[in-house]
Image (cartoon, rainbow, N blue to C red):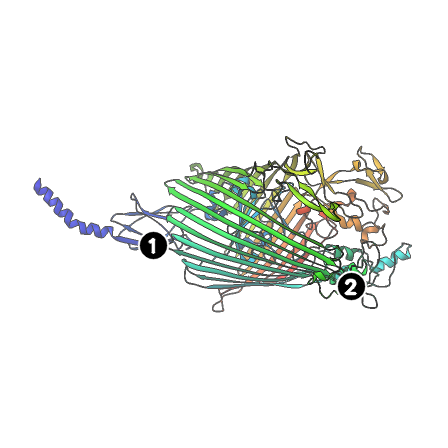
Amino acid sequence: MKKQLTNFLFLLFMALPWVALAQDLTLTGTVKDQDGKPIEVAMVGIKNTSTLAYTDAEGKFTLKYGPNSILVVSAIGYDKQEIALTNQRTLDIILTGGNASLDELVVVGYGTQRKGDVTSSVSSVKSEDFLKGTVRDAAQLIQGKVAGLRITTPSGDPNATTQINLRGLNSINGSQNPLVIVDGVPGSITTVAPEDIESIDVLKDGSAAAIYGTRATGGVILITTRKNKNSENKTTVEYNAYVNQQRIYRKPEMMDASDYRRLISQGYAYEDLGSNTNWIDEVLQNPLSHNHNLAFFGGNYKTNFTGTLNYRDWDGIMLKTGQERVALRADLNHEMYDGKVKTNLQLISTTTTSNQGGAGGWAWRQAMIRNPTDAIKNADGTWKESNAYMYDNPLGYIHETINDAKTKENRFSGSVEYRPMRDLNFKLLASRVQGDYLSGSATTFQHVNTTKNNMNGTASRYTSANTENLLELTGNYVKTFNDHRFTLLGGYSWQDNTSENFYAYNYDFPTDAYSYNKLEAGTALQRGLASMTSYKSKWQLAGFFARLNYVFDNKYMVMASVRREGSSTFGENNQWGTFPAFSLGWNIANEEFLKGTNTISQLKLRAGVGVTGTIASSPYQSQISYNFATGQGAFIGGKWVPGFIPARNFNPDLRWEKKTEWNAGLDFGIYKNKLSGSIDFYTRTVNDLLYYFSVPVPPYLTSSMMLNAGSMKNSGIEVMLNYAAIQKKDFSWNTTLTFSTNKNKLIDLSNDQFDVTTEYFDAGYTGEPIQVSTHRVQVGGPIGQFFVLKSVGVDDNGKWLVENKNGEVIPIAQATPEDRQFYGNGIPKFNVGWNNNLNYKRFDLTVNFRGAFGHDILNMQRLYYENPVNKAYNVLKTAYDPVYGKELKNDLVYVSHYIEKGDYLKLDNITLGYTLPKVIKGINNLRVYGSVLNLYTFTGYKGIDPEGVSYTGDYTFAPGIDHRDKYPNTRTYTLGLNVSF
């Protein structure tokens, strides 16, 4: 026994060096996909041991192994691979299988998530799918590409932005706009240049957006800017530029001088002033504009930078309108301590300048109504004017008005990320956004303010400043073991905002040479007729949030989140609110009963619910306020003393609006995702609407106050289909279709304390001389309904015949306000988008369609200018066309005759590009392209453009009005160049 033990110890002693040598073998390698792209965070381990490593951003790994070891390599979305190791020291591994589309990362609140694990309604659009050509802001990049996200361009003004609405209306007095987050910091759709954006992700439903709490009722748009992707020491320079020309989309057909003279010869009371002037042509131009974007990318995977410079000089189609913008972004990343610490510094600086005249809605109206036989100037060179009511020379108004403005925004942000262990990550983000605005306006002595109203020049200055600070601390824990994968997020957010402004106005100057630069020179100030205002406000927001994502066996998914948020804008009894969310997912395609089929590549059911909020539009609505009012003062002690009067009631119970949204969806793909898409069904109810109530005085100090009362509901369906129609070596065609519906209803306008005496409110306005509201929002009915006298004919005297409340036909002179009725709706029932990308060898073609159906438009140009009763103003050529077989001789009045079907399908964008062969050393890519924006619209609408209507701001509850005072929409022709070095 002793001999056997001695022999065993001897053999063990002799074997130890070999065992030690075997254990010391070091293996280094890379893990890549079938296309040769590195796979980050792939798990590489020795089977049946605790030895484990993860790949870095370049797909590299290092570990040690012993004899007879089996290497196990796995990554989300790829087939697991086992490799027998026989003294290898380097190894390049290719993982196959999986579904690449499911492995794409989409940006969600406070992080990213694998697309296949998402259980909420989230849409992601990458830069290669953005709208091509001339784009005014970030929203236009994804126009028509996200189901349920309605983006329109209602104005051709180069200083205007797009309109955005996600899944209908959600508030009466709160904001309807989505929350926009740019690289983790709240911003807007104009924060960065469109050319500087890598991807845009849209959190559409409540379960996805609830992590942002009170700011997310309108949805969340997450913008990710372009970053350096080079892992080697390499510098890349990109230059993108285009030049464009804009033209009015469609000119209104007004009567010309020959029409005037023909009608005069027929006995109509028009006046021939002896000239021939096309006033619309005189106020328009076909300008050339240009845009340049220069981007620098450099460094390696440890330290890298991105720098971009964007310059845009756009002129508008109306004289003396334009915008010049310079945008600079610098982004620096550095990691240290083997990737455990990562830092980021970012600066975004934007300066926008507009030096404009008096062009705009009023000048456009004057160009339409001006007598075409009138001259532009008098014989002495002064502008020819008339004393007619609200009738000005549009060219004089444009050229004798100065409107200059400059906007500056500087955004500083920095973050530190610490990873103490592979699965745990902490991040601190801080930012400061400083925005400043300065404008100056003046009118000269040749302006109608002086020539008609004897004001001897006017001038004003306005300035505002806005500072917003943000501090966020988040912790993220990710763990994968066996078939389980979960992510736990926790965080704290603090935000404050200070806003202030100042305005001064004066007139009656000794000279107009000062413009707006010497306001004190106006003598109206000494007479007490000048005006001056100033204001300052501040609000704060703090929140604690947490989210859990769990995936089992790549089949079953759960997400739960909660945000506890406090706001200074609400009453002391309700400053904190809780916003939970929960969603489930079932990846049916990974079930055993479907694994054998080659047809279904993706099939996932989703369902979720989430609560979001809306804060008050003003930060002091819950607090009592008093004002000094000169008009309500008294003569005391030999002088006039302003009165001290209440301005706002105290409401300690003012609280958030709360939107509860349910969403159910299906993501699918067949034939290796040749056809893929998603379908979503949603319903959302907003309770505790913020609404101004009439209250009794006393006990209240003022007659109205903002209260929480009432509720509204939205529901709809969203569909997105992607079809890889043709995928050949030299030719490919990919097409995407989006479709959405929305139905809304105002459920109630009361609360437990107050019942409204009238269960409706009116919205919209026709303007002078008609001066009536255009819409009515009624409890129990949909939002957006026109409320109007229904016209049914014209009598023998040329007067309107309308339908009264009993359905009887009566002369309009006998109609009363009670005879008005609901007629049509300005909100589309259906919105569609159809996007096509075709590639043939080096050619690429993009064709985009958008459309809206099932809505109506009040054509105010026809309302005012298709009625020949007032011979002092020009009218449309159709004004003398028979109406119900008779000539119209009625005064201007708001009747249903001018409400038209607004359905349209727009060939919105067509872009043809060509990528040149690589024949010049140092040039990696060179592409030239041509593009046309707003090319053609299929519609029966008679106005300029059925898209040119507003549905935000003052028109939120009066949608579908094509206003007469507008900046007309345009068609844009673009030639561009993309080159990278």
Q: Is residue 846 left or right of residue 272?
A: left
Identified by mark 2, the residue type is Gln
Name the residue: 49% across, 68% down.
919
Q: Quadrant of the N terminus?
A: top left
Q: Is residue 878 left or right of residue 173?
A: right
| Depth check, front residue: 730 or 464 | 464
- Residue on which disc 1 sits: 29
Name the residue: 8% across, 43% down.
3
Q: Nearer the viewer, mark 1 or mark 2?
A: 2
The count of marks equals 2
* Quarter residue 372 falls in: bottom right
Q: Is residue 665 visible?
A: yes
Q: Label 2's element?
A: loop
C-alpha span from label 1 to label 2? 79 Å
| Depth check, front residue: 602 or 963 | 963
Q: Label 1's element?
A: strand
Residue furthest top as drawn? 752
Instruction: Tell me the number on the disc at residue 446.
Output: 2
Identified by mark 1, the residue type is Gly
Mark before the other along the chain sequence, 1 or 2: 1
Q: Is residue 185 left or right of residue 371?
A: left
Residue 491 position, x and y percent, is 46, 44
Residue furthest front as drawn? 637
